[in-house]
Structures are given as C-alpha cells and as structure tokens.
Amino acid sequence: MADLKIDDNAPVSVAIGETLLEVSKRESSTIPYSCDGVPACARCKVIIVKGEEHISVMEEKEKNLMGNSYFITKERLACQTKIISDGDVEIKNISE
C-alpha cells in the first residue's frame, strides 16, 4: 500500500494499481473530471509534488492531451496516473 496526500488533506492508503482520480472520488476530494477517465477532458490535472518514483509513466493517451511538458510542469492527469509501488505520494489539485 502507498500513502497519497491530496492538497492539505490527511494522507490516505492507496492500493497498487489505483489511479489518483479513483482515490479522489473514493475520498470525496475535489479533483474535477467530466470524462470519467477516458481521457478526453483533461480537467483532472494535478501536480506531482512528491513520490514520482511511485507513479506510472505517461502513456500515449495522456501525452496526446498533455504534451511532453511533464518534466517541466510536473502536471499529470489524475485519471491516467496510477500508483505502481509502495511509498508516499503527494499531489496538488491545479484545477481549482
């Protein structure tokens, strides 16, 4: 299990393979979305603050919406970003 901290909320336990959006929905967080993870809307943008080594790499669908600027902006789509290993991950919702 990993621990995920969203904004200023207390960390929550996350199973390996869960997306950041799935956790946000389960925990009633405020990450907006409208396509439910297709991805098509790009509304669920978050900034990876900590724990980059514990999340999945960006795949083609996400790159098509976001471009290749992750290494500069640290922005990812919560619907496409999965927890892949145990550890602490912290994200900021930038859609507010």
Image: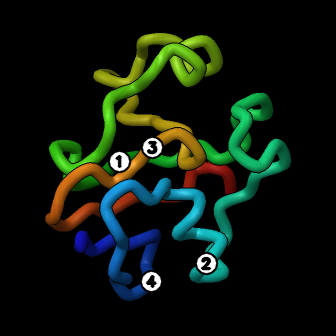
Gap between marks 3 and 4 measured at Cα: 19 Å
Which label's residue is closer to the chain start, 4 or 1? 4
The answer to whether the residues at label 1 and label 3 have Cβ atoms under 8 Å apart is: yes
Query: In the picture provided, is 84 more to the left or to the right than 31?
Result: left
Above or below, comparing residue 53 to residue 93 in the picture:
above
State which mark lies toward you, 4 or 2: 2
Side of 42 relative to 71 (left or right): right
Q: Secondary structure at mark 2?
A: helix
Q: Nearer the viewer, mark 2 or mark 1?
A: 2
Return the residue at label 1: 48
Mark 4, other Cα within 10 Å: few <14 / some 14–19 / many ≥20:
few
Mark 2 or 1 closer to N-term?
2
* The image quarter in which residue 71 lies: top left
Residue at image mark 2: 26
Mark 3 or mark 4: which comes first in sequence?
4
Disc on res. 81: 3
Disc 4 residue type (three-letter): Asn
Q: Is residue 32 above or below residue 74?
A: below
Q: Residue furthest bottom?
A: 10
Residue 96 falls left or right of residue 52? right
Mark 2 or mark 3: whose residue is earlier in sequence: 2
- Mark 3 or 4, which is nearer the eye? 3
Q: According to the image, label 4 marks what residue?
A: 9
Q: Amino acid at mark 1?
A: Ile
Name the residue located 37 percent from the left edge and 83 percent from the top edge.
12
Residue at 59 percent across and 19 percent down: it is 61
Where is residue 74? Give x, y as percent: 36, 35
Looking at the rendered structure, the secondary structure element under dot 3 is: loop
